[in-house]
Amino acid sequence: MKHWRDWERMQEELPGMQVRHFDTMLRFSHDYLELPPYYERKACLTSVFLEEIDGKAYDVTLRFIGVCSLRLDMHFEYLGDIEISLEEIEDIHFYVHDYEHGGISFYCEEIAYIGAKENVEENLQLALSRWKQLVQMERPNEDALGKAFKDLAVFADRPMVVDLLRKSVTHENAMIRRLGYQYKAENRK
């Protein structure tokens, strides 16, 4: 995409990511950077967004370059529902704003994809939430239950997860009991 640095790399690393809307801006920093090609100082915002892609959470870092008309309202706990839209006004190419609460808005010349990394703590919370939701169902989908168990077992080094998986051997659902016994058999010490 024109005026979006490393667009192709972002598409390769995060296929299926919705790039026009972001649910949560975790943090941001403001800086003046001297960037190529002319090394003129430009106002930049470097932001980290929490994105869920295919059931996994990632921290996606974007840098907004040539920021102007920044408006920030800190009346809310977090900045969420961020939309990036094309806005062609002279050197300005993007308008970024919180379309739900109006917590932040600005224009920028271009966007750079810095990188993404898996958000382990958020993935743990997602796995716990899915597992707890499924074990409360009378007849959970077996494939979904197997996937939730596999996702949760990744965090088997956490005491709360170990306790949860061990307790599943007493569950009334036979599949959940079987998964609990499978966990115990694989993790005998």
Image (cartoon, helix red, strand yellow):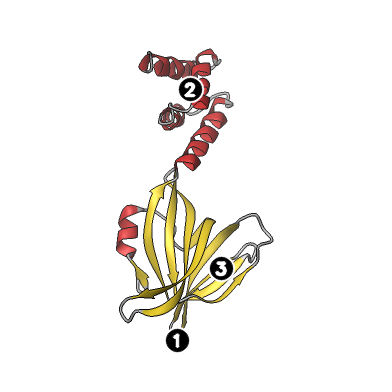
Q: Quadrant of residue 103?
A: bottom right
The residue where tag 3 is placed is 97
101 on left or right of 149: right
Task: Say whether disc 3 or disc 1 marks the residue closer to the N-terminus.
Answer: 1
Which residue sits at x=32%, y=53%? Answer: 13
The residue where tag 1 is placed is 90
Question: Looking at the picture, which amino acid does disc 1 mark?
Answer: Glu
Where does residue 114 sit, x and y in percent of width and height? 37, 61
* Mark 2 vs mark 3: in front: 2
Which residue sits at x=43%, y=55%? Answer: 60
Which residue sits at x=38%, y=53%? Answer: 116
How many C-alpha atoms fall within 10 Å of the one at disc 2: few (<14), some, or many (≥20)?
some
* Mark 2 vs mark 1: in front: 2
Question: Looking at the picture, which amino acid does disc 3 mark?
Answer: His
* Label 3 – label 1 distance at C-alpha: 19 Å
Disc 3, SS: strand
